[in-house]
Amino acid sequence: MAEQKGYLWAFPSPNDFVVEKGDGTLKDYHFGKKTIAHKFCPNCGTAVMAERGNEGPSTGINVRTFKDFDEEKYEKTPPYNGAGLEPHYAPPADGPEVSDLDRTTKCYRGSCHCGKVSYDLQSQPLEEIGILSCNCSICSRNADLWVYPMEKDVKLRGENHLTVYRFGRKVGGHAFCSTCGVPVVNKLRPPPDGDAAEGIAGRLPVNVRTINGIDLNALPVNKADGKNLRGDPYEV
């Protein structure tokens, strides 16, 4: 779950954390032993916080939601091996995670966390073409990592379980599972002014974090400055 959503956690004391807006509007997602409630916005899919009832800090805040978040400015502790906790999570599987179609094409299988949305992606090896990290207001919150295949190369299942969030010029349609909140694809549509429409026509970007068994550390990452792409900065 943490890898699919790219969480960066901080654990404030109860006296240092106050909900200023939208208290009670977040949607909960539980899995495994169901001791942790992963809370996300049902409108935009942003993972905001998590609450647990067992020992230790009861509330974790996803610092990616902080205003003016800049990942490079934060000092991180060593990663926590949540994948090692029992019962071990197994992604929904109806075939191999990655398979070779020919010498130049692979089939990648992926899904959201709960499995209601899944897909097969045909692509050149991602180790060769790389992936895209964007610092815009929504991608930075979700830690999205994108690859941009043609829509015909993505076999999407469970599309009716997706919620699509658009903002600004409404070109990007950030589509996340309405049950677990995991962002899966980006339903692009042509910009209203026609600018750069040729580059996105017919494409269905896929969030690489949702590919089953993917080793993100093995993939070259290209960075896009979506935050300063055009016009005034995004404000809540």
Image (cartoon, rainbow, N blue to C red):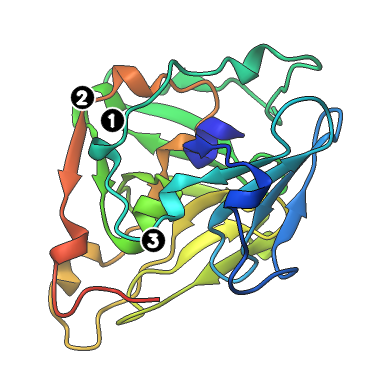
Residue, disc 3: 138
Label pair 2/3, CB-CB below 8 angstroms: no
For marks 2 and 3, give the CA distance. 26 Å
**Residue type pointed to by label 1:** Gln
N-term mark: 1 or 3:
1
Badge 3 element: helix
Badge 1 element: loop
Residue, disc 2: 128
Residue 172 x/y as whole percent:
36, 69
User: 230 or 24, which lies in front?
Assistant: 24
Residue, disc 1: 124
**Residue type pointed to by label 3:** Ile
For marks 1 and 2, give the CA distance. 7 Å
The C terminus appears in which quarter of the rendering? bottom left
Badge 2 element: helix
For marks 1 and 3, give the CA distance. 27 Å
Relative to 82, does residue 177 appear above or below in the rendering? below
Label pair 1/3, CB-CB below 8 angstroms: no
Label pair 1/2, CB-CB below 8 angstroms: yes
**Residue type pointed to by label 2:** Glu
**Which residue is at a point 19% across and 73% down the rendered structure image?**
197
What label sits on residue 234 in the rendered view?
Answer: none
